Image (tube, coloured by chain):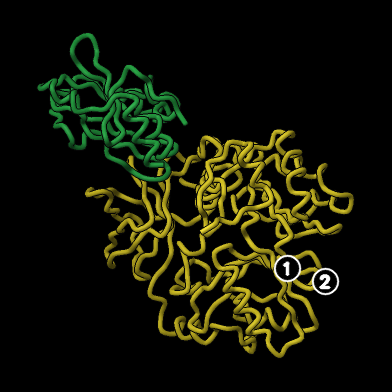
Chain colours: A yellow, B green
Amino acid sequence: MTLKTTPLHAAHQRADARLVDFAGWEMPLHYGSQIDEHHAVRIGAGVFDVSHMQVVDVCGGQAQALLRRLLANDVAKLRTPGGALYSCMLNADGGVVDDLIVYFRGDEGYRMVVNAATAESDIAHMRAVARGLDASVAPRPELALLAVQGPEAVAKVAPLLPGRLRTAGELRPFHAVWGEEWMAARTGYTGEDGFEIMLPAERAEGFWDALLRSGTRPIGLGARDTLRLEAGMNLYGTDMDESTTPLVSNLGWTVAWEPPERDFIGRAALERQRAEGVPAQLVGLVLGGRGVLRGGTRIETPAGDGTVTSGSFAPTLGVSIALARIPAASEAPELTAHLRGRTMPVRRVKPPFVRHGKSLLD
Amino acid sequence: MSETPQDLRYSESHEWVREESDGSVTVGITGHAQELLGDLVFVETPEPGSAASAGEACATVESVKAASDVYAPVSGEVVAVNEGLADAPELVNESPYGDGWLFRIQPSDTTQLDALMDADAYSAKVASES
């Protein structure tokens, strides 16, 4: 199979990227050291090419009605153009088919960013639900998507944006500005300040090069994963998927139950699960010792066994951390991990683990 | 691609071996191996004085990606370990053939060294695997 490439493929090669297959895309894993890249984002600024993720515009007179049916969170909360929210898209069983950010763009409708691996099935699903509605679902493959993250990100990015977007530095978190085919949003996946920027593919390399000249480090998917894990953010396909609901994925806060008459796909199943009792919970863990919790690691609790859904070494903390799905009845603060034939203590914590470069652990 | 030093010998499982003047051998993992693993975060070395058996796990290197056993290329007694790696596992990435060495063995049967590859054979093996 030929891997798909982003508009920045040549730039990655020039930066000595180690390229790997990620969901059918040839993407940078790191540019030398993923741990150095992780620290660069926590203390300075880093740029990630995330153009493999898909921008999808939803427009038309019934765009809002379509998204209120499709998403577990409620886009009617977005009253001011430029606002954004995080949501899961569910199947009829309440399972998560994707997680995404949706931006309200006023008269121009809504813009979503969905995961690479699920983009094709998401669009088919959305179009099927849109049938008969005055709403269009249009992928925008001609846009590149870059994330610039870190305490210095705003200062590095603001001078490089087109005129209309120069005010991006004053944006509140989860807000966006757009113009001249660019869009800058104060969102991210690292627990640091920064932007996610959509821009025409043919402008991506010039913008990337300017960022690197400003001292912004290129960051691969390896550091992206440890940064998001420290920030306590779920990864689709790992921490939740079609077989798990938001309620067993620490994402109950993203489900808009009000107003009760809004019949989003999966609602009945979620209400049933809530009434019957949620069977599991997704929690944060910190390993007490030398070793690394990894996806699949067995976690023993007094209420039964659980499993690490994503685990890694946390460079900011110097220890291993994880997200794990354990029985809902488990309340014990100290649990046991079965790691490579040994048992080691793990402490249960509430994610996030790191925020704005600082440990949140006791 | 990292350089493969000519004066070392190599195992199928990507360890390198240097014969020292006192008859002991120093063991580490190759540049190719550390590249595949990515940044190391923990290194577990054997106890000095313990026995090593050729082909059996003797140390563990754990990276951001995976934990891997390091196999003893020869049998014998572990006479030294690289204590510095406990606090600086990144030495294995930065200097796999130098400061990132793992342990030293006093071999009990030096003929086992003959089964190891020279640099050219190891380079050919790596090329055929990539």
Q: Please, which chain is the residue tagged with disc 2 on?
A: A
Check disc 1 and report the residue beneath it: A111
Please tell me which residue is depicted at 81% across the width and 68% down the height of the picture. A81
User: Which mark, by number, is residue B130?
Assistant: none
Quadrant for the C terminus of chain B in the image: top left
Q: Are marks 1 and 2 in contact (CB under 8 Å)?
A: yes
The furthest residue to the left: B108
Q: Label 1: state its secondary structure.
A: strand
Q: Please, which chain is the residue tagged with disc 1 on?
A: A
Check disc 2 and report the residue beneath it: A108
Neighbourhood count class around disc 1 (C-alpha, 10 Å): few under 14, some 14–19, many 20 upward? many
Give amino acid for label 2. Answer: Glu
Please tell me which residue is depicted at 30% across the width and 53% down the height of the picture. A337
Could you say which is closer to the camera, residue A111 or residue B8?
B8
Give amino acid for label 1. Answer: Arg
Please tell me which residue is depicted at 24% across the width and 50% down the height of the picture. A343
Above or below — where is B3 with respect to A64?
above
Q: Quadrant of residue B79?
A: top left
In this picture, residue A209 sits left or right of residue A96 = right
